[in-house]
Image (tube, helix red, strand yellow):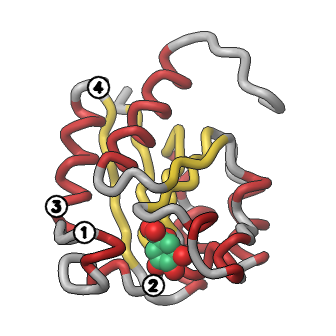
Amino acid sequence: MTRRVLLLSGPNLDRLGTRSPEIYGTATLAQHVERAHARAAAHGLEVRHLQSNFEGDLIEAVRDATDCIAVVINAGALTHTSWALADALATFDGVVIEVHLSNPAAREPYRHVSTLAGVADGSIAGFGELSYDLALEAVARLVTAEYDRPGA
Ligand code: DQA
């Protein structure tokens, strides 16, 4: 059976490549997704990706992800505001990884709050395009080995 990972990209991430390259780098979202596909494939995993600028689309994608073993989510600024997305992720039966290209903790104070961190198994932030590699690597290791995952 194919093990799928749902990769979610929130608002404005479709502008990566030209959006604040000094913060987010010059890689496009398509390039990040391509890396995620490659990293997942190396572990026999398949990635399904959705980008949306609408909170409800992301919530519904989480609710529909019953065929996925993990959700990797860069929710963009919804990270700092969306309790509804956090509620949806809390009901997901699998690994949840929060990912960011930049390090929100080192940026403006409003980015220091994450509504998602508390419902994620873990968060990866600040490593640029390496953040996606590390997130997929974490998923692969968590689902293929017996790790003592807090709260699991
Ligand atoms: C981001 C960080 C968020 O604060 C911001 O709103 C984004 C991108 C990141 O990947 O670093 O849109 O999630």
What residue do we see at 34% from left, 57% from top? 128
Mark 1 = which residue? 25
Direction from residue 132 to residue 74 in the image, left or right:
right
Gap between marks 4 and 1 measured at Cα = 28 Å
Residue of label 4: 44
Q: Amino acid at mark 4?
A: Gly
Label 4 residue near ligand 1, CB within 8 Å: no
**Image quadrant where one finds the N terminus:** top left
Mark 2 close to ligand 1, CB under 8 Å = yes
Asked if one can make out residue 12 in the rendered structure from this viewpoint, the answer is yes
What amino acid is labelled 1 in the image? Gly
Q: Which labelled disc corresponds to residue 31?
A: 3
In this rendering, is residue 90 above or below 85?
above
Q: Residues within 10 Å of mark 3 (few under 14, many from 20)?
A: some
- Pinpoint residue 144: horizontal percent, then vertical percent: 48, 17
Above or below — where is 47 with respect to 49? above
Tell me the mark number nearer the camera, choosing from 2 and 1: 1
